[in-house]
Every structure is written in structure tokens, then in C-alpha cells.
Amino acid sequence: MQVNKETFCVLPFIHTVLNPYDSSKHNTNALPCCRYPPSNTEFFENTDPITKSKTWIKLQEQFLNNEKPSNCYHCWRDEEHNTTSYRQQMLTNFSKVIDDGSYKEKKLLFLELMFGNTCNLACRTCGSTFSSKWLPIDNYLYANNMQATNQTTNIKFSNWKELDLTELIQLKIMGGEPFYQKGALELLKYLSNIGVLKNIQLSIPTNCTIQLNDRWKELLLEAKKVYFYLSVDAYGKLNDYIRSGSDWDTVEKNLHSFCEFVKQHQHKIHASVNTVVSVYNVNRLFELEEYIKEEFHWAVYGDIAQYPSYLDIGLLPNHIKNNIIASGVSERITGYLNSKEYSEKDFEKLKNVTSLLDKYNKKNLKDYNPEMYNWIIND
């Protein structure tokens, strides 16, 4: 049966995301897609959700029936704004298994896996679930009667050793910071030993604070292809403000190091820059885009933050949205700004959390993004 590529998504047939989970409440937290809302899937005990999870099976039926599942709203929204969605990217990445119909075999071809939350940064768009550095910050905020994120006190991580990885052709290693994760190297060594690593397209996001060592390079070069997603949220010191613990000089040095590695092995190693678009950087994105384009000739992709909600640019007051649009943002961001309504509750929380974290980090927004500071604080 020929699928309708205007509505079809292959991920529920071939893919699993293993996120951290709260061991006091659930056994595991698996998602059919990294953009799928966690609140809309059951917490799943089995290591084979593709064939046994109610969430996966329902999505499979919907996509085969040319339906557009409402929980996949991230992709539908991107496509409405003429932006290539994650669904469309996967249609390209897995065109062979779609065209030959082998996706119907429902084998694990694509895995996204988080080994732990060990990280050296406490990014303002993150939280304790994904960064160990956030734990003392949570305690500080709670002591000041403020909650910024959904703190997980009994955090656990799924065991990849229970999975059948023999058919794997795409792997994304998530963090924390992947290059801090001992389990990541252990997994790559295992895949190498069973003769599967050579078949795999590997994706690794990194905050660019750590240089690749020789053992990492050796294993990466064994993979079929490697895509680095270099997480940088702004040009210069504003990046350090948003990504607390980061040092721009180190980041810039490592960007050049990654660039050299890519040039040496451009037949299989690729890189792009990913930035989390939030209240703190949306009006300064052009600086980062120009720098990356001129210095490295890489693309810059922006993921618009919706969590924590107080950093969601779509919930800002209309006059601030107008200022942002006037700063020269893309059509996609303009469309997003116009698609959501102002939230007074989130705007007040933005002011309070920003003030508290500025005191905690001893860094003031007005010194890093004075325009946004004036729009927010002097509103």
C-alpha cells in the first residue's frame, strides 16, 4: 500500500525515545518521537513499545488512515509555516524503508537514548531532569518560593542492554552532555563488537565545552555517518548567560576543533548549530546566524522553547512581540509569535525567575541583552 506522504509519519513504526522517568511512579518513559508530548503517552514497562504500546499502535493506525494526530502538533505547525518539519525530515531519512514497505515489520531502526543527566552546564531552558547542575538551583528557587521546572526527585534511566539493537541504522545519543556519559562510549563499543556500528547514522548534540578525545574519534569514524548538533544559544557572552557554566572562549575554540574534524572527514562527518529560541535570545539570533555562516559555513536551526513556559516567546505581551518582529526575525518565528496569546501569569514568572537566577549566577540580563531586559523589566 502506497502511503500518503502529506500526512504519513514513519516514526511510530521504527522508532523509540527513551527519556528519564520517575521511579517512584513509573517503570519507564518511552516516547514515539522526541517532539511528542510526554503527558499524552502511557508510561510503558516493556522494552518493545513499537509492537506492544497502545500509543504506538494508535499512531500507526492513524497514519495509515491518512489522519493527522493532534498530539503531533509540532510538525503540523511547522508545515503550516512552510518550515520543514521533523516528520518530513524522517520521510527523507527513511525513504527506503517507506518505499519498500519494510517499515511494516515494526523493527527498531532508530533509537534516541539518554544515559543520564550528568552535565557541566545549567542552561536556563533546561532543568534537573536533564542536567545534574540544576539540582541546587531548584533548591534555591524553592527556598525563594519559586518553582521553575518540574523537578524529578527519583530520576532513573532505561537500560539499553534490554533492547534488540541488531537492526539499528540510526542512533541519537542525548544528554545531559553526551561526551560526559560513560554509557555512551560503552554503547558504541558494544555496537562495534556486534558489527552494527558501521551501519549506523549517529547523531550527537553537544554543548561544545568538551573536546573530542581519540577514543571517541576512533568510534565515530567507524560509524556510517555522524551528525554533530552543536548547541549554541547566542553569539559571545550572551551564550554564557543563557548556558550557565559555559565559557564563550572555550566554546569558540571547540567550534573550530569540530570544524577541523569535519573537514578532515567530510565524507562521513557533518555538523550544524542548534539553538534553543527563548525570550533571552530571540532578538539576537541574527548575530549568531551571521557568525556561524561566515566563520564555519554551517546552518543554524532554531528550536522554539515551549518549556519552561515562561520562556516561551509566544506568551509575551503583544508590544514585546512587535519589538521582536521589528528586530528582523524569520517568517517562522513571526508566525509563531502571532499564533499564541499573551500569558500574564507566565510573564510575571519570567520576571521573577530571571531576577532570582541573575542573583544566583551573579549575571544580570541587562549586561548581556539590554534590549530584552528593558522590554521585560521596564514593561
Image (tube, helix red, strand yellow):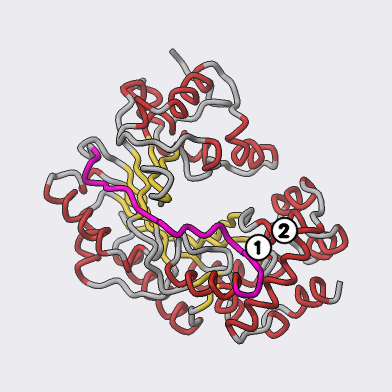
Label 2 is placed on what type of residue?
Ile
Q: Main secondary structure of the magenta part?
A: loop
Count neighbours of disc 2 (C-alpha within 10 A) and say few if under 14, some if 14 to 19, many if 20 or more.
many
Give the label on residue 313, or none: 2
Q: Which mark is residue 54?
A: none
Return the residue nearer the eye: 316 or 286.
316
Specify whether 374 is left or right of 251.
right
10 Å neighbourhood of mark 1: few (<14), some, or many (≥20)? many
Of 54 and 285, the residue lying toward us: 54
Identify the image quadrant of the N terminus: top left
Q: Secondary structure at mark 1?
A: loop
User: Identity of the amino acid at label 1?
Assistant: Ser
Q: Are marks 1 and 2 in contact (CB under 8 Å)?
A: yes
Q: Which residue is mark 1?
A: 278
Identify the element where label 2 is drawn.
Answer: helix
- Residue 155 highlighted magenta (yes or no): yes
- Residue 154, percent across and down? 41, 56
x 41%, y 65%: residue: 206
As drawn, which residue projects farthest toward the left? 193
Q: What segment carries the magenta color?
A: 143-163
Residue 311 picture quarter: bottom right
**Quadrant (top left, top right, bottom left, bottom right) of the C terminus:** bottom right
Instruction: Tell how many labels.
Output: 2
The x, y position of residue 344, in whole percent, is 82, 58
Q: Is 256 inside the magenta-drawn segment?
A: no
